[in-house]
Each structure stands twice: as structure tokens, then as C-alpha cells.
Image (cartoon, helix red, strand yellow):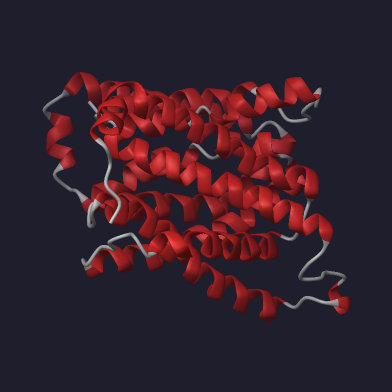
Amino acid sequence: MMQTSAAFHEFMTGWGWVFASVIAAVFSAGFFLVNQYLKQPGHLLVFWMRVIVVVAMSPLMLYIELPTDPRFYVAVILTVFAGTFADVRTFNAAAKFGGGVVSRVQPVTVWCAFLLWFFFDPGLLARYAAHPANTAVILAALAGCVNFASHMNKCEVTRAALIYTAPALVGYTFTTVLNKYAMDHGPLEGAVYGYMYIQSFTAVLVTGIYSLVKGVGPATTVSWVNKKMLTAVLLAAAAWTCHMIFKNYAMAFTPNPSYQAAINLSTPLFILLFYALARHKEEARVMPGLGIVACAIVLALAAGR
């Protein structure tokens, strides 16, 4: 079993978790951008990406003490069906609408997960009632999300992207809640790496079967492997793996999980920075999407206090 050193623990409990959260957001930006430029079929990209993750992590897992709580495994398996097909949809959406647009509608999952978590922890209602100031900020943030969403709806590109990614947003909402549930039912390294490995291993089976059923080959002008696909797979696998490692360690050491989630919502800003450097001009309206990002950050911080 891996052990965290005292120096690492001290660093992470200080500003380390903030640094890790920012790095996680940068890699998350890469995840959205990969298929904007390489435009590969989402189901095959997810399949091969998870194959790479399983192969890369298998030697490491010999030294990891996996969780023994069956609830951990139930939660992880459920995330495969919710999150994996959300990834497929997101990759296809990025190819169609661009990574920037897709990233700016993702914060919708934050306040959806916020509402969904009441079913897992009904006692939250009483705790929020005991802190009316925080509750007022939360309600204002939710109202802001609705307001900016209405402005997003006026942009044809963003509206089309939001409708197309709606199934993915639902999947990510459930995955967010299940991820938190799984992390609460295992030791640190076992939960962090076990979650990634078991989810990826199961996702290979699920997306492999899905790809066979969907059909690939000359008849559909899609092949399992090509040079462009290999580039996309390697980049996506690296972005996803690094994002998950930094995110999960940050989540383990942050004073409150909502703080890490808020920093991770800076992903659209890193994509805009990349666009500026690459001189890429977006067709969609940017400000309403950034408004939802800002409201989601406020919601995450207020809900965590």
C-alpha cells in the first residue's frame, strides 16, 4: 500500500490542495479540447482511452490496498453507466460545437448535483435553515444560474450545444454524487486509484460491447484504429488521468469539498486562454456561459460553509 509522506501531507493541507485543484482544471480543459481538433467518434475514443488507462495503471494497482466496502464498488459501477456515456456525448459535442461551448454548460451539473444530494442527505435542509445568510446566497446563485441560462438560450450555438449535451449533463450530475459517495467508503489511495482503475476496466467492457453493437468498419467508414485516433486517445487518456489524480488528491485534503469543486469550475477560463493564444474565435456568446460558471462557484462556496 502507498503511504503519503509527512512533508507531502503538510504541503497538501496548506496550499497544496489549491495548486492541485488548479492543475486539475488545466487538464480538464485539455479533455474538452482534444476532440474539438481531432474529431474522432466519441464511443471509440472513450473505449481506447480507458484501455490505455487500464494498461498504464495495472502495475501500480499491485501496490494499492483496494476498499473492502461493497458500497464503494456499487457506486463505481453505477458511474460507469452514467459517466462513461456522458464522456462519449461530451467528446462528440466538442467535435461538433467546440470545447469552449461545451465546458461552459458543464457547471449546470453543479447545481443539479446540489439539489440531488438532498436525497442522499435530507438533514441538509435543517442545516441550511439554521444558516439563513448562506441559504440566501445559495438561492441567489441558483436564481443567477436560471437567469444566465435564459440568456444562453438566446444564442443558437449554445442552445444547440445545451440540448445536445443534456444527456451528458444528467450523467455527470449522477456521477458527481456517486463519486463523493464512493470516496467516503474506502481508504485514501485505495479510493482514489481504485475508483479510476475499476471504473476504467468496467468502461472498457461496456464501451467495447457498445462499439460492436453500434458497428464499426468499412460499412460505416469508421475504423477501430488510425493515426489520428491514436493521437486523440493518448492525449485524452493523459488529460483524464492527470485530471483525476490531481482532483482526487485535492478533494482528500481540501478543508471542504466545495472549495475544490469551485476551483475546478475555472476550466472554461483556461480554454479561453488557450483560444487567445491559438487565435481561435468562438461563434457562441461567451458571457452568459461565464455567468453560469460564476454562479456555480458562488453556489459551491456558499454550500460548503
Task: Give coordinates of residue 259: x percent, y percent.
Answer: 34, 28
Q: Nearer the viewer, residue 152 or 264?
A: 264
Q: Is residue 302 left or right of residue 214?
A: left
Would residue 296 be seen by someone viewing this image from the given angle?
no
Task: Give coordinates of residue 173: x percent, y percent.
Answer: 43, 50
Residue at 42% of width from left, 66% of height from top? 198
Residue at 38% of width from left, 23% of height from top? 298
Q: Nearer the viewer, residue 99 or 192?
A: 192
Q: Is residue 122 left or right of residue 106?
A: left
Task: Give coordinates of residue 159: x percent, y percent.
Answer: 67, 40
Task: Give coordinates of residue 54: x percent, y percent.
Answer: 52, 64
Vertical arrangement, residue 22 with respect to residue 95, above or below: above
Residue at 78% of width from left, 51% of height from top? 39
Residue at 28% of width from left, 41% of height from top? 4
Vertical arrangement, residue 74 with respect to residue 305, above or below: below
Q: Nearer the viewer, residue 208 or 118?
A: 208
Work out which quarter of the rendered image holds the N terminus and state it.
bottom left
Which of the 4 image quadrants contains residue 278? top right
Count every numbered label the image shows and give the total. Answer: 0
Vertical arrangement, residue 199 with respect to residue 282, above or below: below
Q: Nearer the viewer, residue 17 or 85?
A: 17
Work out which quarter of the rendered image holds the C terminus and state it.
top left
Would residue 178 be seen by someone viewing this image from the given angle?
yes
Q: Is residue 39 left or right of residue 149?
A: right
